[in-house]
Image (spheres, rainbow, N blue to C red):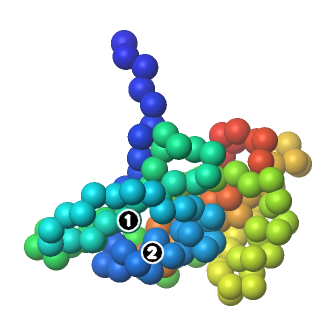
Amino acid sequence: MATLQLNHVARETDDVRRLAAFYEEVLGFERITSPNYSGFQVAWLRLPGTPGVALHIIERDPAAAPAAVAPGAAGAPPAQLPRRHHLAFSVADYDGFLAGLKVRGTDVFEKTQPDGRTRQVFFFDPDGNGLEVTSSGTGDKH
């Protein structure tokens, strides 16, 4: 069997600029070269230190079937995210990151894993996509 590597995760949105700015300002993504498509906008982003994995933000096709309502857009609380679809990241300065979310007024759900060391915060991006940031060095423990 071939060995796979993650290449990118795509998020569709009605506002490429707003969503890209969120990922840049809140999560520290940086823009990378992206194709120029006629008829719709895209923004390709990556986290510093992860050159092989990108986040593709793509303008939603208005002619396509309507997207399902995202969990955050429907008013679901972040407390439901540990068992729902979400992207997870780790950070060395967990307390600093959490403080930044709170300054922005972001609705968050915090929890600690049973090991007592792994701290997690769950929240939504502006389009209602679930996100998690975990204290670094934890691996996939959710």
1 or 2: tag closer to the N-terminus: 2
Crowding at dot 2, Cα within 10 Å, few <14 / some 14-19 / many 20+, comes out as many
Pointer 1 residue:
43
Q: Can residue 78 be seen in the rendering of this structure? A: no
Residue 10: numbered disc = none
Residue 116 in the image, given as x and y percentages of width and height: 88, 48
Residue 41 in the image, given as x and y percentages of width and height: 27, 71
Task: Answer left or right for 105 relative to 50.
Answer: right
Give the amino acid type for the residue marked by disc 1 in the picture.
Ala
Give the amino acid type for the residue marked by disc 2 in the picture.
Leu
Q: Quadrant of residue 62?
A: bottom left
Pointer 2 residue:
19
- Residue drawn at x 51%, y 76% as measured from the top left: 21
- Residue drawn at x 75%, y 76% as measured from the top left: 100
Residue 123 lies, with reference to residue 7, above or below; the image says below
- Residue drawn at x 62%, y 65% as measured from the top left: 27
The number of numbered badges drawn on the structure is 2
Q: Are marks 1 and 2 in contact (CB under 8 Å)?
A: yes
- Front-most of residues 117 and 97: 97
- Residue drawn at x 36%, y 75% as measured from the top left: 16
Q: Quadrant of the N terminus?
A: top left
Residue 5 in the image, given as x and y percentages of width and height: 45, 31
Task: Answer left or right for 105 relative to 62.
Answer: right
Residue 49 lies, with reference to residue 34, above or below; the image says above
